[in-house]
Image (cartoon, rainbow, N blue to C red):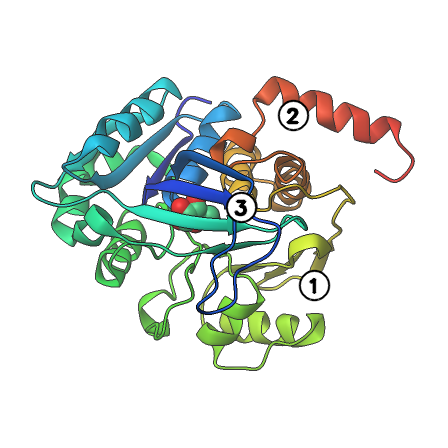
Amino acid sequence: MAGKKIAVVGSNMVDLITYTDRMPAPGETIEAPRFEMGCGGKGANQAIAAARLGAEVMMITKVGDDIFADNTIRNLETSGIDTRFVERVPGTSSGVAPIFVEPSGENCILIIKGANAHLSPADIDRAEEALKDCALIVMQLEVPLETIYHTVALGARHGIETLLNPAPAPAELDASRIETLTFLVPNQTELATISGMPVTNEEDAEKAARHLVEKGIRTVIVTLGGRGALLVSAGAETRRIEAIAVKPVDTTGAGDAFIGSFARYYVESGDMGGALHKAVRYAADSITRPGTQKSYASAEDFQAFLAGLEASPSA
Ligand code: RIB
């Protein structure tokens, strides 16, 4: 995939995952059966998913000055990710995410941004030459909003395609500063916040996404969790990408698996529909295993998963 490099401008976190039979009530102490620590953060997750599937990936992020930093950098490097623009912030902790997963596979996440809060527009400027070699810049919102606006503008200036996953849902987002995005990939809650329109069902989601497309964003992809995704593009009919049924074990990082794999297949082929078809499947496969990045399949294992689906009538 020469010349098809993906840059991820975003967060990294250490995921502290507790598997619990139920969430405690306020003031209550309960015992949980299992705990796991792993690499996470929406940015790093998306970078790892794309790299694991064979994409050439570069990451711009900040780690802290603590025991987690080396492990995070090593994890990116062993996945083949270019870490020239991963910097340490002295006197600051790395990002950390306590996560609780219930038997249904559903999760609740708290994030402490730590060093991620220090990723600045100047850091993006330092990487400008390297970014010019990228086909797509992927972003999320676990780093300062001003840095994201700056990156979107840089992408537009150099004709680089840009994708924003507006997660966590921002309290406020200046729509005029993200109009040049190629892709906005929200879930329904994030879409409601950004569009200022109610989104309680798929019909609402289509209307709100269409509204954003009319304002300039070329394509809005609405993730619908276990129900697949909606693709709303300028000058084209809305397309529905159907989900596939799997038994969920842990849904943590499924949205990131979706975006990382979409980025990887999109830069290779330019075919949005085909990339989304694969992304829905990659994310579904990831929720059948515990952990965040740990649950992301290699290219080889994903091919085997797809082959298994083709052999089954419900695929
Ligand atoms: O999207 C899942 C991710 O959200 C976790 O890895 C956690 O670190 C938070 O960033």
Q: Secondary structure at mark 2?
A: helix
Q: Earlier in the sequence, mark 3 or mark 2?
A: 3
Q: From this viewpoint, is residue 42 visible?
A: no
Q: Residues within 10 Å of mark 3 (few under 14, many from 20)?
A: some
Task: State the mark number for residue 302.
Answer: 2
In this rendering, is residue 241 above or below 43? Answer: below
In this figure, which residue is indicated by the disc labeled 3?
32
Q: Secondary structure at mark 3?
A: loop
Question: What is the quadrant of residue 131 in the picture?
Answer: top left
Given the image, on which type of amino acid does mark 1 rest? Glu
Give residue 163's position: percent from left, percent from top.
Answer: 43, 51
Task: State the mark number for residue 237.
Answer: 1
Q: Residue at x 19, y 41 (%)?
A: 128
Q: Residue at x 49, y 39 (%)?
A: 260
Q: CA distance from mark 2 to mark 1?
A: 30 Å
Q: How many marks?
A: 3
Question: What is the quadrant of residue 250 in the picture?
Answer: top right
Q: Secondary structure at mark 1?
A: loop
